[in-house]
Image: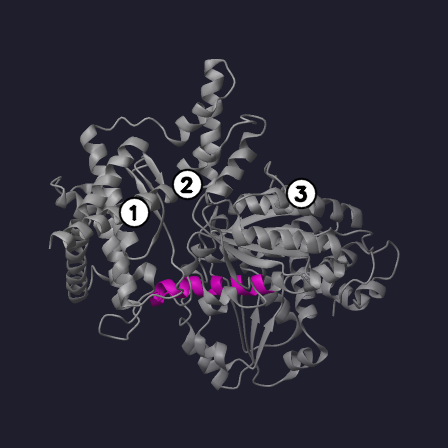
Amino acid sequence: MVRSLKKPLVDDVPTEEYLGVDQERAGTALRRAGSSLTLLASLLLEEAMTPEIRHRVTSERGLAVLVEAPSAAWVPHLRRALAQIAKWGLIEGRDGSYQARRKPTDGAAELVEAVAAGQRVAVICHAPEAHVPPAFIAAADLRLRTGRPTAALVAAAIRALTGRTPRKLPTSVEGLDLPELALALRSGAGGATGCVKRLQRTLAARASSAPLREVPLVHNLHGMGEPGGWARRLVDDFHTMRPELFWREADKCSVWAGDPGTGKTSLAHSLALSLGLEFRETSVAAWFEGSSYLDKTIAALVEAFAGARARGREGRGVILFCDELDALPSREGGEDDRTGSYWKPMQQAYLREVEATAAAGERVILIGATNHPRRLDPALLRPGRFGRVISVPRPDASALEGILRQHLGEDLAEADLARAALAGLGGTGADVTAWVRGARRSARVAGRSMTLDDLLDEVLPPDDRSADDLWRCAVHEAAHGVVAHAFGGQVRKVSIVASGRRGGSTVIAPGDAQTLGKDGLQALVVSALAGRAAEEAFGLGVSTGAHDDLAHATGIAASARVSFGLGGTLVHRAPMERAATLLEGDPELRASVGRDLQRAYVAASGHVRDRRNLVEALARLLLTERVVDGGDFMRLMAAHDRAQAALDGQEACHG
């Protein structure tokens, strides 16, 4: 067996002293193999077998063996290597290629017949759940997982090909697939040194280190919430703990969840700068680049994680940033059999690689990022994998002011940025970048220094909508704020500043309650429908402006019935984010949700009628100020309450 390296490999030192490789066996493997491809496969197979397992493989009668290859490229060569060390009644290689592409159930009868007849049967496959009959997987006496080739194994192959052990060999060769290894080793041309140089060129050509952004260090960042605190603690631990202890015990894995533009990627770059570590990025989309074939996608997945582990062992450590973590469907997502059979092998490979990378002692900080945490496979979040989800909030006014100051640098050094921060409340770090870039451009084109007005013009750009459209928008957003406040919501900002396709926005802080009952969900639906109800109540007629509101309200109303058991049945049919997708194919559910929405709309209309004066007052304030922050909103509410109390007192006196 090939064992772990204990110290650097040195020329002219017997290989077995460091590798535990039997020289005679390596030479025999080379003579049998005839090429570096089969040599590598033979050594990999030998490494995976203990003496006991090897005895069973070579002599046990009626043995059924499943060999799990590192990738599809290894399958035919592992099949040849396995055939060379033992006799088989039936030996199959299933690699998903055109010639051997099969459903898992294809060929089941032939395998069953061979096993039932007492023949020795072996199946070699890189993704058994995708290509091997489930009955054979369950019945196999031995499932042999070869793992990926280690640096020690590659060194042993070089020794077998050239007669010399390489002096130095990068451990990142573990991230290379069989064709790359075989091309680099060839037939030993150029000796051990030539093999190593070709390996180094191969590794350099596919290096995936990402250049770091120009961002502040972790302790100088603003508005990152709990992920920022996690990163600061990690930096402190890195600089105060012994390296071995840090990589073994530090809290070095987590998932960051937040809206697009909230700074998840920038925080990861900042962490890499603060720690002085190599930064690597990967994603599900990256694994599909160049090919959608499952074997190549899984190979790219494994390469991303194995490469990070190998680079971590070579240096001080690595940060591996896994973006779009939700792009891989959850195993609890309820896909149909055809879709599930495609994703299952990839999901299993993903979990294995995450667990191997997150293991104590691996010199990798593993960070995931997602915009949709509810879509994540719960298995990813178990201890020993990513571990937990930490939410990245949209920055509050104070944090937004700090982010503005960071991006402005020496510009507007003496300016009070509070107004700009309040006006931009609800924006993200990405929005701040765009605002500052636009303000600098305006000043540059005008041939002068930047002014606060330049910045405010970006945060509050000129509005070319007609007076009627602005009034409609003001009434719509004012109703959202007033009705949400009536249900106990904390209104942070009401704005009629257009952004993208949205004419305005209302920012409401989530309540303290961790869970909501039926009344709580109803309040969310009513608040969402209040804007449309106000347009109708003010005689403006309904419009397309409630498009997003209707989608939001429909999703909540549907989830009450199919996700939360609040609609007459306890059957859970879909997670909240997928609840509305069931409406198209279920007329009965669609009718029930429609009735729920109609009742909520009647309630919203009633709330708007009861608070018409308040909605109108807030709408007129919005026409003047364009943005009303939480403080001004509450002052308006308080003034209205005092006026209403005085009016009620007068009526009581007259009564």
**Is most of the magenta stretch helix, strand or loop?**
helix
Residue receiving disc 2: 425
Q: Nearer the viewer, residue 353 or 47?
A: 353
Specify the label residue 204 is tagged with. Answer: 3
User: Going by the image, does 341 lie left or right of 654?
Assistant: right
Quarter of the picture containing the N terminus is bottom right
Residue receiving disc 1: 637
**Disc 2 versus disc 1: nearer the observer:** 1
Q: CA distance from mark 2 to mark 3?
A: 45 Å
User: Going by the image, does 253 lie left or right of 621?
Assistant: right
Residue 222 place in picture, x, y as percent: 55, 43
Query: Helix, strand, or loop for circle 2?
Result: loop
Quarter of the picture containing the C terminus is bottom left
Q: Nearer the viewer, residue 387 or 27?
A: 387
Residue 363 place in picture, x, y as percent: 69, 57
Which residue appears farthest toward the front when viewing the image?
653
Residue at 29% over, 47% down:
481
- Mark found first going from the N terminus, 2 or 3: 3
Query: In the rendered structure, which amino acid carries the disc numbered 1?
Result: Met
Query: In the rendered structure, which amino acid carries the disc numbered 3?
Result: Ala
Query: Helix, strand, or loop for circle 3?
Result: helix
Residue at 61% over, 44% down:
270
Q: Nearer the viewer, residue 550 or 129?
A: 550
Q: CA distance from mark 3 to mark 1?
A: 64 Å
Residue interval drawn in magenta: 333-355
